[in-house]
Amino acid sequence: MATARLDYVAPWWTYWLHNFPHFNLFLQPVDGTFRPEEESYQQSLITLACVGAVGMSLSLLVLTIYLICLCCYCKDMDEDSKRPETCCVTWAAVITGLVMCSAVGVGFYGNSEANDGVYQLTYSLYGANRTLGSVENLVAGSLGDVQSGLRQHLERLDEIFAARADYLQTLRFMRLMVNNVIGELTELPDVTRANVDLAAIADRTALLEYYRWLTYLLLLILDLVICLAMCLGMAKHSRWLLITIMAFVALSLILSWASLGAGTATAVATSDFCVSPDKFIVNQTKDVLTADVAHYYLYCSPNLPNPFQRSMTVCQRSLTTMQNQILGLLQFSVPFFPTAERDLLGIQRLLNASEFNVRQLTVLLDCRGLHKDYVDALMGVCYDGVEGLLYLSLFSLLAACALSVMLCTVFRLWTLMGSRDREYDDIDEEDPFNPEARRISYNSRRSNIHSFCSFTSSLDSQTSHQPPHHQSASNVMPPPEYMNQVMLFGGSPRYENLPLIGRGSPPPSLKTVTSAV
């Protein structure tokens, strides 16, 4: 038995999870033995699943306290401070994003590990199902051949050998051998129900695993999208984007705490099974298999006797004895009863087929094949499966904490955006250094230029229709074109470098160079 136990040793993390306290709904301690059909054990799993609800309550409490402190802080802010400090918010967002990305990486690894473990479990269940199905088919085929085919041939041979008492005695001996084979095959354990249960369990497990894997994959993708949207919202300072982020962060926070509770309960229940799987399987198969048969396949120890060895030996010897009897009848009776040759050859073919089936049964009923499937299933569930659940629980915990901090960061960023808007509202429009005021002043000057140009053009058109006054024209000096340009451009220094039209002098920069030379 010790040799067989080396094939499977429960990992340390299953013992660690198994030692978690088990309480029912009334907080009374419950035995940690894997008993999923009992109500007290189910209540202990529900209590473990409430860890997610406790974490969600703590997150809501922390967020409430933070919002209250944030509101008080905003009321007590100094009105003279125009730009609140945003360094802490930026670093908090960066650290939260890094933690979230790390949690997503852990989640992808845990999801893959859990999927591999469940796949190994279902593969082993299907392998054991094929083995049990082959055993069932071989037993049914051998019984059919012996019960129907051999008896029909023996009845016809009774009619043919009716005059020979020695041949009839040989036929009666063969009937005794046939009854021995039928009795031994009938006493084999009925594996039909076990076969159906294994197939149903494998199908149900594969379906549940597909939905579990898909749910975690969507949750991981949602967390990544939230991180990217958070970066975009901080860069764009978009309020509607921040509102959308807050909604999805709240949804992901609820899902993360819920997945933490479900993952913890599932990991503890699986660990309870992995610590002592043999006891549970013996109790579940007691209506189908006897205890010695169950222990033979669960341990597969050379010290344990094969419960099918005696039956297979009796069948093999009975079939061999009948083969010898048929060979003797073929040798001595066919020359006197040629019509018996057909039935004797038919019996020989059936005996050959039955002997082949018995040999296959002996191989399939050996413990090594089914025990390998059993150990592979345990390794998949208790190593890869539980390890993946632990990583997924770690992902849920990290993601929930990071999302809580991210929600606080979004609230703080919202207040900073409100403070920035109030700063722009407080800017004096008469301030000459205000870009908005300079833009408005420039637009007003452009409108004045347009009005002045319109006035001068209208004045020129009026004077063109009047006769010229030579005296007044000779007495009034026209304004220099430089002054006209100054009036046009409002005296702005940005037009200082324009060519001075009509003055006959170079630009100021050229004059400076000339004087220097």
Image (cartoon, helix red, strand yellow):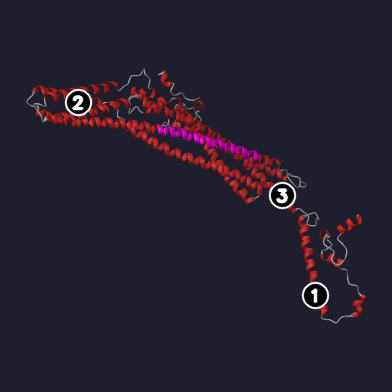
Q: Residues within 10 Å of mark 2 (few under 14, many from 20)?
A: many
Disc 1, SS: helix
Let me know if residue 103 is in the magenta part: yes
Q: Name the residue under label 1.
A: 458
Residue shown at 25%/23% (left/top)?
A: 316
Give residue 9's position: percent from left, percent from top: 46, 23
Residue 260 seen in the current view: no
Q: What are the residue bounds of the magenta stretch? A: 94-123
Q: Mark 2 points at which residue?
A: 178
Q: Are marks 2 and 1 in contact (CB under 8 Å)?
A: no
Q: Main secondary structure of the magenta part?
A: helix
- Where residue 264 sits in the image (x, y, percent)? 51, 33
Q: Mark 3 points at which residue?
A: 420
Report the amino acid beneath label 2: Val
The Cα–Cα distance between marks 1 and 3, rounded to whole angstroms, is: 49 Å
Report the quarter where the N terminus lies.
top left
Q: Residues within 10 Å of mark 3 (few under 14, many from 20)?
A: some
Counting from the top left corner in percent of width and height, residue 35 is at 42, 29
| Residue ID at (42%, 39%) | 207
Marks 2/1: CA distance? Answer: 133 Å
Quarter of the image for the C terminus: give it. bottom right
Residue 373 visible to an observer of this rendering: yes
Tag 2's secondary structure? helix
Q: Quadrant of residue 336?
A: top left
* Between marks 1 and 3 in the image, the one whose residue lies nearer the viewer: 1
Residue found 34% across the figure and 30% down from its top: 131
Q: Cβ–Cβ below 8 Å for labels 2 and 3?
A: no
Residue 83 lies within the magenta run:
no
Nearer to me, 483 or 419: 483
